[in-house]
Image: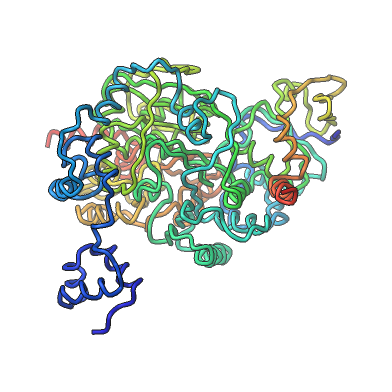
């Protein structure tokens, strides 16, 4: 799988209240969640996201609450992948379970420019930023498979069918 | 009087136990209850309750009727009767409990395993698991709060008709309780229908309290067990020596359907506290100091174990604060090992037996940290991150519009007690509001009994129902643009409690009370010294 997208460059410690403010938690429709993605950071943000955009963030992305709406809202707003120096534990799990691709890269943030293009090749574990090539470690097989299935629910359904 | 149905009689028996008490409760003669019971072939309550095996096990574990009886919540003489009945007379030669404690103290075991490794191995059915290994486990209990609404939606998406085990699912409503909007009201409604339909008996409606408090208070989780919850502060149950952590709603739906989840065996870090708590300094200040030093991702993906004399002296409530707030440095688990304090705490609540777990003495910790707390000042986490911690003296005049005392971090009886001690006979600053939320119904009742609620009301505080409300900016005390709040809660992220242009400071209940009186961030030691001197 190869992803190409426009970069949104974000800082360290983007917490779940910035990604998805607590007041919107009663929403259970994913399309509606998308209208508030990253609203805590900037009220205008949800309107600016285009399908296929990629976030390149600093360390500890998604820290804080276990609210999976943080991952769901980004995914349904059209974010194709989040690249970060590190992810908080629960956000990492939630993103995989929602089928939102993640890449952990120590260096990407340094070379990323907001609005520029990033290319991510998952098959060989490489991302390209302005001709700069960086390698990243692939996800363990079974986690990659959850992602490939489009998230945990389709993955479980597939498994149950196989039984 | 007509004889009650068998189920009704069983229910009465469960509640009142003896025929005499049932008879008293429903106002009939005792012989009639006995007659009904025989006719419906229901055994005398106590006769089927404790097997010889069970009594023998407890006797061998404790070696005295008082402690063994306490384990079953029965009197020493009742335990003695059971022993006699099963003909267990000899004093056990070696006490299991003493053995356990001894092996902990001396760590004669040659292993090198951490608490997380031991419990995960037990759950995965293996003799040993390595750090980094991915294991599939069935949790002992799972918890969801208002977000059970989302879990239910995902569970229905999977298309399995029945949950894997209705007895292992606990759902307390607390985040938006009572419902603050139509959307929440609908979610609560769906949850109520679902628990009825799926026969989930451990459902607590809006009256009971904050989920994590309820889990520990009602002994849904016990030492050595594994709990997963759709809330990040699920790490709290480490306070009784359990392994517990937060996951997302979709993943919980997966557990509801299949009863299993993958977990990576984490690295463990050991935190040791040296010295004693000075006046005006509490568990909250101690854990804020740790987070300040380790940073907000310092314990990411890791299992934290707490040690030190001050920890052994802490109550379960104070340990709760440590385990709870460890989430704010990214911890996956945060455990205070089982000891006498835990045992005593569980005596009254636990009906099930449990097997505590301790780390081996030379366990493989990734890192060990020592903190001397003897000279620690009250700590304040400043906006907008929990690791932005300062001594109270370092802050100048910081005017505060609202003080919040409560939450799963600091809303228990000891928290309310210390705040009330400072507020007693005084009124809070006229430009400051103070909200008080006891963290559960049990805490609220106890506070009422002790006259603490009255002190709050007389000091012009607003006492709210047990729940999460203001902590996550859901309802009951949202902040306006430009307002500042000092809270005993667990997060001070930008916009957490309302407007994105508001600020949140985190501190202990004592600091909160002192601040409410002054109208600006204040040092509780000034007030406590006066109380101390009388």
Q: From the viewer's perspective, is B331 left or right of A54?
A: left
Which x, y percent locates residue B263? 58, 34
Q: From the viewer's perspective, is A34 left or right of B444?
A: right
Residue B418 in view (yes/no): yes
Foreground: B459 or B441?
Answer: B441
Quadrant housing the C terminus of chain B: top left
Residue B407 in view (yes/no): no
Which x, y percent locates residue B242? 41, 36
Rendered view: B139 above or below B40: above
Quadrant housing the N terminus of chain B: bottom left
Q: Quadrant of residue B463?
A: bottom left
Foreground: B82 or B248?
Answer: B82
Rendered view: B510 above or below B192: above
Q: From the viewer's perspective, is B372 left or right of A92?
A: left
At 31% from the left edge and 22% from the top edge, which residue is drawn?
B103
**Image color mode:** rainbow
Which x, y percent locates residue B430? 33, 51
At 59% from the left edge and 58% from the top edge, which residue is drawn?
B152
Question: Extreme front residue here?
Answer: B87
Which x, y percent locates residue B387? 49, 29
At 60% from the left edge and 37% from the top edge, which residue is drawn?
B262
Rendered view: B198 above or below B360: below
Question: Extreme bottom residue here?
Answer: B1
Total numbered circles? 0
């Amino acid at each position: 799988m190869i992803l190409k997208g426009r970069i949104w460059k974000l800082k360290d410690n983007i917490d779940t209240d910035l990604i998805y403010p607590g007041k919107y938690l009663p929403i259970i429709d994913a399309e509606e969640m998308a209208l508030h993605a990253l609203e805590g950071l900037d009220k205008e943000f949800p309107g600016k996201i285009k399908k296929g955009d990629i976030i390149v963030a600093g360390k500890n992305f998604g820290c804080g609450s276990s609210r999976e709406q943080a991952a769901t809202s980004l995914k349904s707003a059209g974010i194709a992948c989040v690249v970060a120096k590190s992810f908080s534990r629960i956000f990492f799990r939630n993103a995989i379970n929602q089928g939102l691709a993640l890449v952990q890269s120590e260096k990407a943030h340094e070379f990323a420019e907001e609005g520029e293009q990033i290319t991510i090749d998952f098959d060989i574990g490489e991302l390209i930023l302005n001709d700069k090539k960086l390698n990243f470690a692939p996800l363990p097989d079974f986690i990659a498979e959850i992602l490939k299935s489009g998230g945990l629910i389709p993955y479980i359904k597939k498994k149950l069918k196989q039984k | 009087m007509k004889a009650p149905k068998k189920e009704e009689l069983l229910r009465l028996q469960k509640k009142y136990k003896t025929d005499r008490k049932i008879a008293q409760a429903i106002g009939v003669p005792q012989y009639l209850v006995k007659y009904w019971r025989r006719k419906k072939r229901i055994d005398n309550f106590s006769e089927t309750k404790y097997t010889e095996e069970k009594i023998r096990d407890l006797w061998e574990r404790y070696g005295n009727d008082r402690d063994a009886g306490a384990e079953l919540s029965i009197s020493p003489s009742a335990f003695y009767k059971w022993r006699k009945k099963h003909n267990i007379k000899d004093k056990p030669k070696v006490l299991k409990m003493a053995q356990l404690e001894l092996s902990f103290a001396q760590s004669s075991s040659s292993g090198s395993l951490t608490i997380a490794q031991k419990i995960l191995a037990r759950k995965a059915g293996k003799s040993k698991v390595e750090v980094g290994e991915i294991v599939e486990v069935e949790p002992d209990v799972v918890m969801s709060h208002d977000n059970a609404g989302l879990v239910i939606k995902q569970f229905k998406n999977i298309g399995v008709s029945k949950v894997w085990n209705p007895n292992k699912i606990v759902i307390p409503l607390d985040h938006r309780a009572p419902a603050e909007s139509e959307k929440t009201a609908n979610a609560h409604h769906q949850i109520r229908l679902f628990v009825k339909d799926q026969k989930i008996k451990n459902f607590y409606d809006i009256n009971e309290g904050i989920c994590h408090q309820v889990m520990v208070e009602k002994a849904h989780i016990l030492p050595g067990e594994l709990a997963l919850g759709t809330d990040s502060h699920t790490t709290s149950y480490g306070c009784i020596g359990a392994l517990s952590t937060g996951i997302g709603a979709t993943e919980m739906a997966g557990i509801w359907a299949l009863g299993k989840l993958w977990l990576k065996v984490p690295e463990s870090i050991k935190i040791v506290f040296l010295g004693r708590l000075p006046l005006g300094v509490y568990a909250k200040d101690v854990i804020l100091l740790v987070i300040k030093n380790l940073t907000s991702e310092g314990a990411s993906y890791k299992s934290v174990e707490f040690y030190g004399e001050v920890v052994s002296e802490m109550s379960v409530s104070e340990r709760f604060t440590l385990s709870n707030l460890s989430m704010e440095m990214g911890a996956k688990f945060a455990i205070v090992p089982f000891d006498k304090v835990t045992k005593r705490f569980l005596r009254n609540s636990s009906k099930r037996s449990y097997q505590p777990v301790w780390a081996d003495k030379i366990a493989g910790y990734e890192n060990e940290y020592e903190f001397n707390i003897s000279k620690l000042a009250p700590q304040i986490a400043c906006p907008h991150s929990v690791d932005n911690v300062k001594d109270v003296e370092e802050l100048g005049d910081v005017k505060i519009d609202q003080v919040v005392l409560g939450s799963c971090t600091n809303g228990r009886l000891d928290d309310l007690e210390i705040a009330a001690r400072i507020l007693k006979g005084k009124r809070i600053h006229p430009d400051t509001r103070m909200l008080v939320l006891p963290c559960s119904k049990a805490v609220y009742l106890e506070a009422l009994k002790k006259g603490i609620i009255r002190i709050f009301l007389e000091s012009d505080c607003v006492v709210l129902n047990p729940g999460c409300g203001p902590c996550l900016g859901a309802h009951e005390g949202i902040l306006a643009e430009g307002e500042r709040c000092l809270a005993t809660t667990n997060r001070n992220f930008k916009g957490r409690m309302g407007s994105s242009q508001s600020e949140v400071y985190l501190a202990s209940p004592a600091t909160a009370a002192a601040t409410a009186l002054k109208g600006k961030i204040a040092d509780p030691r000034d007030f406590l010294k006066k109380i101390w001197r009388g």
